[in-house]
Amino acid sequence: MTNHSIRRPGRPYTGAGLLGAVGRARHLGLVLALALLALVGLVTVPETFATTSNVVTVLALAATIGVITVGMTFVIIGGGIDLSVGAVMALASVWATTLATQSYGPMVMVICAVLVGTGAGLLSGFLISYGRMVPFIATLAMLVAARGLAERMSDRRTQLVQPGNSALVDLSSGRVLGLPPIVFVFAAVVVAGWVVLNRTTFGRRTYAVGGNPEAAKLAGIDVRRHTMLLYGLSGLCCGIAAVIIMARTTTGSSTHGDLYELDAIAAVIIGGTLLTGGRGTIGGSILGLLIFTLITNLFILNGLNTSDQLIAKGLIIVIAVLLQRRSLRSRT
Amino acid sequence: MSELLVMKGIVKGFPGVRALSGVDFSLRAGEVHCLLGQNGAGKSTLIKILAGAHRPDEGTITLGGEQVRMTGPTDAIRLGIATIYQELDLVDGLSVAENVFLGHEHATFGFARRRAANRATAALLARLGHPEIPPAIEVGRLAPAGKQVVSMARALSHDARVIVMDEPSAALAHDEVQGLFRVIRELTAQGVAVVYISHRLEEIREIGDRVTVLKDGRTAAAGLPARDTPTGRIVSLMTGRDVEYVFPPRREAAFGAEVLRVEDLSVPGVFSGVSFSVRAGEIVGLAGLVGSGRTEIAEAVYGARGAGGRVFVDGRPVGRGGVTRAVRLGMGLAPEERKAQALLLEESLARNITLGSLPRYSRLGWLDRRRERADAAAQINAVDIRPPDPDRPVKTLSGGNQQKAVLARWLINGRRLLLLDEPTRGVDVGARAELYAVIRGLTDAGIGVLLISSEVPEVLGLADRVLVIREGAVVHEADARDLDEHRVLDLVMAAQDSTPHKEEPGD
């Protein structure tokens, strides 16, 4: 048999090497954007931008949403969306800082936050996969309900981390190798996320479930169970993010994480993950997030209007998606 | 009577396939002209050309004495050619009138003039003999027969002179078909010409005036009288083919133990009381028309569709575990829609092949990527996928090689039974022989195969045993060597009221 239909004239197939290169080039674009922003910082606010304390600020700022972004990347590659992340993180922070939980010490607070986050995620996932609800609706319901529950548990008051549990706060105020431990937590989550996505069957299935759920199902993958686990994973990340925000703010509050879902989704999209599922990378999402965080940082350092900052972020999302669509079209 | 529409020497090729190689077709005002031909004969390509959806590579189309050139579906509509596809293209959430005038609404400055549209729709429905359908009702609430009438009203609203109907009776019950025929007679009495496509000879005899038979992209016979042409002549025009398929020789060795047993499988409204078995090394073919229930039977066996009855693999019940359980017991499916249901088009060939056997390469969830790749490469060689590059995105492969990738997915982890639904769809003739050899090779390894195909020669040439399915029931079972194409076509196309399965008890 001939393979004449495979090779199109003028557009020779150049192998996976090129595809890989295009993928790297896409990341290269993000890295360049990041470098450009850093350059802007060095030029406009040279005395404050390149200081250790500012780098620490940026990384600590990125850590909270960064951890959430890792979970969001999984959910979106798997063909879903999770709008509840900010609210679930707030609920986990409130639950972990109730006086009852705090009486057991910092370890139990961490475990509590992680369990609450994972449980909320699994519940959303259950509604989506076994209850056949649309992810948008199910996680929207979780967003509203989790905020409400957090308000009820805390009586809308900000709950302080008790002095006896200051070990938790040390995660943010302490220094290991010159950096606060939460930055290492963030890094560990990113590395773990990358490994799971690229080196395990779970990751492979995530791409399959998002890319072609019907094919995944007919190949014997339990698509519903996998979908539920994806939201559980996102919830787990929210729980970890709750620990980070408790350390940074020394509080648990029902107002934590407002609109975090939008920043996390935007970071994932800027990072080149398809909103329709099946394709994407952790690295891209993290670069997207760092770009966002750096913009915030530059606006603050330059004393600019925060409204303009939102406009700039909006523009970046549009540009990123337009570029993404172009690179897609040139490949098909 | 003069010819209203004449198509002459129509040639149409797609990459790798020549769908039409010289078709002549002519249509008179006021007649019902039936188009007959087996799957792949070129019927759908021809009507898509008529609908303006495809442009012919060669040939001319003359309408009312003038040569026309259509560049899109809107041109066809403007010329008065309306096509009613099998899957009706109606919007369920809109009213009957809104559907009829979709795209050419009665409106003043963008405001819909609903009353005018409703009145015009009522007139059209009355003209079709169905004044009882209210123009304001949502289309989604109508039965299939009602939707068909709405589609025809839409065709009339464009002042169609030619209406093409692609298997209009497929979704209708017997008395609804009679209603459809009444509407068609109304139309032809008003001078509209109808192109009618159906597999059911009885219907063609009843409603048709003339018959044109297509075979392998050519006109085998044009303008035969629909009522008097003997069935034998029509069937032999459809079957006598230019292309001879090459099938591998059948296995001489005896079959092994029973791999699959299906007992009294049924899905209400689709099929019922289906029982059969497949032995190790045996290929069992399901022959039947599109819509006869054959695909649904395979899906139910595979656990992808809830069904009554029982399915056993090697004596173990599949039960309620669904696809996951079926795969664990050793089943594999190569689905009908390869791209939509089987492949991750963007992913590499290797990843597509190992998709069904990831647990084999996982230790505590960790992927052993080197073993995964080695196994994929071995399978690529075993079924001879070309080019043998595991990293190539699967969407760049030809249809035949994509199908081999799906087969390789299941070969990699020792299947007991494979369900192959239309394995050669979209595969060109040269590659088919290879695919047949691969399928036959499966049985040498002791795998049982359930083969579904709407191409009768394929079922007869490849299968050891054949079950003929008609309207959701097994109507005949025989050794493939004791059947011929004529006999099978007779069985699958027999008049629908001769089947006694409708009054079956149970649920």
Image: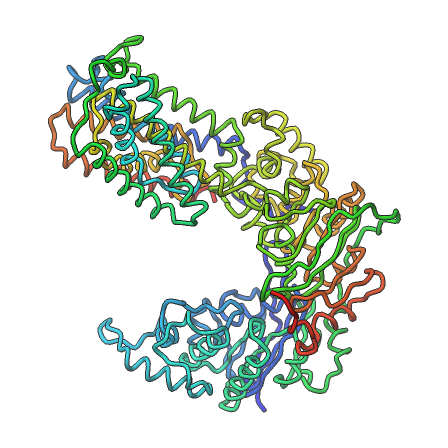
In front here: A329 or A101? A101
Residue B475 coordinates in the image, percent (x, y):
73, 68
Left or right: B33 as drawn, with respect to A108? right
Q: Residue at x 14, y 33 (%)?
A: A306
In front here: A135 or A100? A100
For the image, the number of numbered tags is 0
Residue A78 coordinates in the image, percent (x, y):
44, 39
Q: Residue at x 61, y 39 (%)?
A: B356
Left or right: A251 as drawn, with respect to A131? left
Left or right: A209 as drawn, with respect to B137? right
Pick the quarter of the image with the N terminus of chain B: bottom right
Placement of B256 over or under A294, stated as above or below: below
Pick the quarter of the image with the C terminus of chain B: bottom right
In front here: A193 or B394? A193
Residue B303 coordinates in the image, percent (x, y):
61, 50
Residue B225 coordinates in the image, percent (x, y):
68, 85
Regarding residue B20, the answer to whether it shows in the image is: no
Placement of B311 over or under B94, stated as above or below: above
Color encoding of the figure: rainbow
Quarter of the view holding residue B240: bottom right
Regarding residue A261, the answer to whether it shows in the image is: yes
